[in-house]
Image (cartoon, coloured by chain):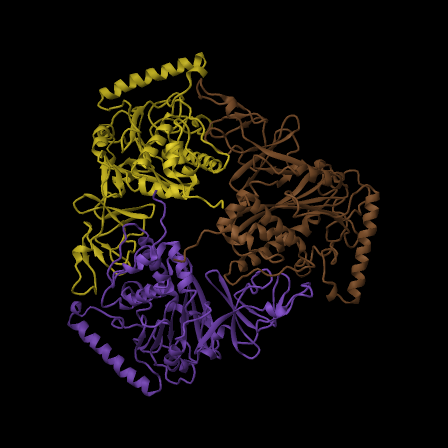
Chain colours: A brown, B yellow, C purple
Amino acid sequence: MPSPKPIALDALIARRRPGYSLEAPFYSSPEVFAADMELIFGRHWIFVGVEPDVPEPGDCYTVEIGTSPVLILRDDDMQIRAFHNVCRHRGAKLVDREKATVGNLVCRYHQWTYGLDGKLLFAEHMGQGFDRSCHGLKPVHLRSLAGLLFVCLADDPPDDFDAVAKVMTPYLAPHDLPNCRVAFQSDLIEKGNWKITMENNRECYHCAGNHPELTIPLFAYGFGFAPEEADETELVQAARYEQMVCDLGREWEAGGLPSGVVEHLDDMVTGFRTQRLPIDGSGQSQTMDTKVACRRLLGQFTDARLGGLSFWTQPNSWHHFMSDHIVTFSVIPLDADNTLLRTKWLVHKDAVEGVDYDLEKLTEVWVATNAQDGDLVALAHAGAKSPAYEPGPYSPHTEGLVDQFCNWYLSRLAAGLGR
Amino acid sequence: MPSPKPIALDALIARRRPGYSLEAPFYSSPEVFAADMELIFGRHWIFVGVEPDVPEPGDCYTVEIGTSPVLILRDDDMQIRAFHNVCRHRGAKLVDREKATVGNLVCRYHQWTYGLDGKLLFAEHMGQGFDRSCHGLKPVHLRSLAGLLFVCLADDPPDDFDAVAKVMTPYLAPHDLPNCRVAFQSDLIEKGNWKITMENNRECYHCAGNHPELTIPLFAYGFGFAPEEADETELVQAARYEQMVCDLGREWEAGGLPSGVVEHLDDMVTGFRTQRLPIDGSGQSQTMDTKVACRRLLGQFTDARLGGLSFWTQPNSWHHFMSDHIVTFSVIPLDADNTLLRTKWLVHKDAVEGVDYDLEKLTEVWVATNAQDGDLVALAHAGAKSPAYEPGPYSPHTEGLVDQFCNWYLSRLAAGLGR
Amino acid sequence: MPSPKPIALDALIARRRPGYSLEAPFYSSPEVFAADMELIFGRHWIFVGVEPDVPEPGDCYTVEIGTSPVLILRDDDMQIRAFHNVCRHRGAKLVDREKATVGNLVCRYHQWTYGLDGKLLFAEHMGQGFDRSCHGLKPVHLRSLAGLLFVCLADDPPDDFDAVAKVMTPYLAPHDLPNCRVAFQSDLIEKGNWKITMENNRECYHCAGNHPELTIPLFAYGFGFAPEEADETELVQAARYEQMVCDLGREWEAGGLPSGVVEHLDDMVTGFRTQRLPIDGSGQSQTMDTKVACRRLLGQFTDARLGGLSFWTQPNSWHHFMSDHIVTFSVIPLDADNTLLRTKWLVHKDAVEGVDYDLEKLTEVWVATNAQDGDLVALAHAGAKSPAYEPGPYSPHTEGLVDQFCNWYLSRLAAGLGR
């Protein structure tokens, strides 16, 4: 009987060939997807939004991680909190819009009313034996990393978040994300498994052939190449690029901006990587003309030419911090075949649209690049479903971070399975 | 391996906490849904329509209960019959529209022809050994309760239907449903499990906050309240309402209209409840101005002020009978996450639209209320999928009938499992 | 616990009642569907297209058989080849349109480049240890039968294709399909299991009642009837039809066109049947006026009155070859409940639309007939899902080929299961 057999996840993990893409079930099996949601997205720090999503007391921002609706809000003491977005009465979703501003949290179903601290304040008709104190909202672990909001659905979140924060805060803090404003958000549903979305993010091997807008600010040599294939001219250009990384890095560091590579993509539970990279052309921003999109610079910056600070996290985010704006990307799996890519563009909170920045110019590089990536993800996902698909080799020069993503993923899956 | 484990339905049933909502798998698991369709909808009396759906000989009305297409028709002797709507040749659906009028039943595929009694009359090219008498339509059990049509897909339907009919016929018969006409039907797909649709129907705790149209004809105190939370004014109003129930009830009974509560929601296989309740304002009908929507009263009624006779059945219906019109509600599960709510508004068969009644006025309270309920069902269903959801307590004052629905459901599920 | 039990496919096959339709799981179970895709569509010769789909070097035509994307192309030596349409790097779909013309095959993702022979010619950045010769496209078995293209996804295809070709080539070759052009293609998604689509094709019992356009060119007696039900007039007509088959057949054979019945629908792995049948009216073509739709005849034909040569194959095709045009039908299962019917109308490659033929006239009979069949397939599929459905008897006079389809299907399934 050829009916689908239960996936032997252990065996699949064990037989992975290093340096090769994953076997097909990792991309298409609903069983592996269920494992991903439980063991990866249910137990790690998941990037979901930014402090400017809830700028004022009473502001709410909701997200869904798999079947878990999560409510993030700012309380009256300006503290940001997260709760399961589920009424303790009969389970109704408490806030059912993406953003809302409230005094208290009132369930629409039977008006059970919670404070911004999650305490149940009021519930009509529940009788005299009813104990309100046992029916507060269930909290969700939340951490802000220089304004980037991460939640963890597990009771015991990975304990290395502080270590990440210690390294990353000096990199990120000067860009002053908490004093930014979300100028634009796009939600793109990619027709592919979330790991294909992540893998696609972890290499720029595909950039030259697919991202005309993105390759304007990026240097061709910034994401690896095969030296033995390069001709004399290319080698000279590559050396000049390396020199630029070195020189600019020294300059930025001298100005108080940490810029060197830190890479813990597969040797930490909360895996991450960062580096500040030169931008081509005028060197200012990831825009079509490489100049700042917003004339009001972030934080205390006076120099626009700060390159692009990239920050990649496992399992689900990447970010680009520039002198004038920040772009954050959150990857949320919907099912084995569909993934939400949520992108936010942030500018200084005092920047005025039409005066300080043009929204089209601010967003056009990544709107175009996301659309192209979504198309490539769909292409890769469709082919990887074929019984003829077998894992192929990653380029040792350009796909090292993809391999690290896979390594991290498989080791965390194994850990979740208790291996 | 965290793949979905088979649901241990016995254990789920056994550990239910009385007075609390059900555990999550009851609302979202496809396995429980399959059990619901087999053991609940496959073995109980299911409300599907009304005699006026098939007023004349040859009139057909079709419904789908899960994967079972059912054909209801009126034969030439005015008897209403039900059959599986499946040709005995190659299984084609016999009548594929919701309503049709036929002489004989002719399968569109190969013209096999059945009489209105289900007998196969004609089948071309079947050869000399073919025995038509073995290939008649398969009957489905059907009962009319004062014009309300119930079918049972099981070979041996619950045997307490007569007992229900004996109690209910005196309540329902004066409204003379068989001599009504379906003035309007709405089909609403609610994005929630059918049990959430039913639970939502079994309480009015949510009415004040959600149903502005419905709370015009309904009395606030008609569906329970917590006396200890009521202030002096409210207690006086509640007492006045109780008096009204008492006085009007006596009046209605004297006029030959049974009106008192009968409640067998969880102590009969064919669970039900009924009560005739005062209507607020002018006391006539569930309309925006509480006056009759149709000036041609039902049956032999001369008095419009007969309140609202409600009739609730397990597992899938409720009904409101007034002096001028009747509203019936049938709940048909589509899958674990989607439910069809079919509502029919009936007036006297001789009432003329635009003359005796205005369709908008007739339907506006329940069209609005259904839409609001559909929204609440979706809200409750979305939250109950969260791993953070846990059964919450029902209000002892306002959610007793919800609890009784759950009790009935679980005991019938257990019975179906042979426990 | 009534959750779906694993299908005991062996038992289902064993208890099939000869001469009766299949049991319900064969039409609706996802498990049986998975078996169908693996054992039937994964191991037999599947009709997918025609030589004129790739007339010139570099022309590509893509199809999906279940989860297998397949790429068919014509190489520079005019040879037609088939490959799995999956890049050997990270599995991206190589050609993602239905038709394309290329020099080499360049993967859009990272520009891996393959020759038309499938060899990997170029892959950037892969390092010095990378062996291109191990990363060519995976071939798929392909055979052309007088221009009809069949592929087999298995490593060892059924070895009787040559035997089929030997019989069929003399029938088909005079129509010179390789020198035709696809004048029109329609893709119709039928809401039914692929076997219901096939069964519907294998009888004309339903034609008289459902296909007004098709019954113009077809003779009523061409597909069987019950002699004991026929009256004197009908028997005379039937005898005249038989005489016509005999006389015309002799005439066609004399002119070098094999015409007699050859039937191996259930006694060969690559089951097929053929016969050249008279066309009613003027006897020329399957059109509304039975005259040729294209005045440029196929091949070397000078006589338009060649009837209709039908060619049926197991598991997924049928074809009608006439003097002026050819219609081919390919059935591709999408899931247990949905099936793609792809129809191509072919005329001589030099025929000019609007001059030699009118597209409407060419296609109207089968466009209408396909739509009617799609409706009947949906009707049969919907009813066969009912628990009340049980296999019904096939007409011994008109549904013999349906029975043979079922016999072939079950024996091939059993063979695939190793029984």
Along the line of sight, the residue nearer the viewer: A81 or C366: A81
The residue at the point 48 percent across, 23 percent down is: A123
* Residue B14 visible, this orientation: yes
Does B18 sit above or below residue A336? above
The residue at the point 22 percent across, 67 percent down is: C396
The residue at the point 44 percent across, 15 percent down is: B228
Where in the figure is residue B19, as x and y percent of width and height?
40, 26
The residue at the point 44 percent across, 43 percent down is: B5
Which image quarter is the N terminus of chain C in?
A: top left
Image quadrant of residue A213?
A: bottom right
Image quadrant of residue B13?
A: top left
Where in the figure is residue A116, as x and y percent of width and height?
59, 27
Along the line of sight, the residue nearer the viewer: B141 or C252: B141
Does C261 sit above or below residue A337? below
Where in the figure is residue B116, as x and y percent of width and height?
20, 50
Q: How many marks?
A: 0
Which image quarter is the C terminus of chain C in?
A: bottom left
* Residue B360 visible, this orientation: no
Along the line of sight, the residue nearer the viewer: C190 or C81: C81
Image quadrant of residue A146?
A: top right
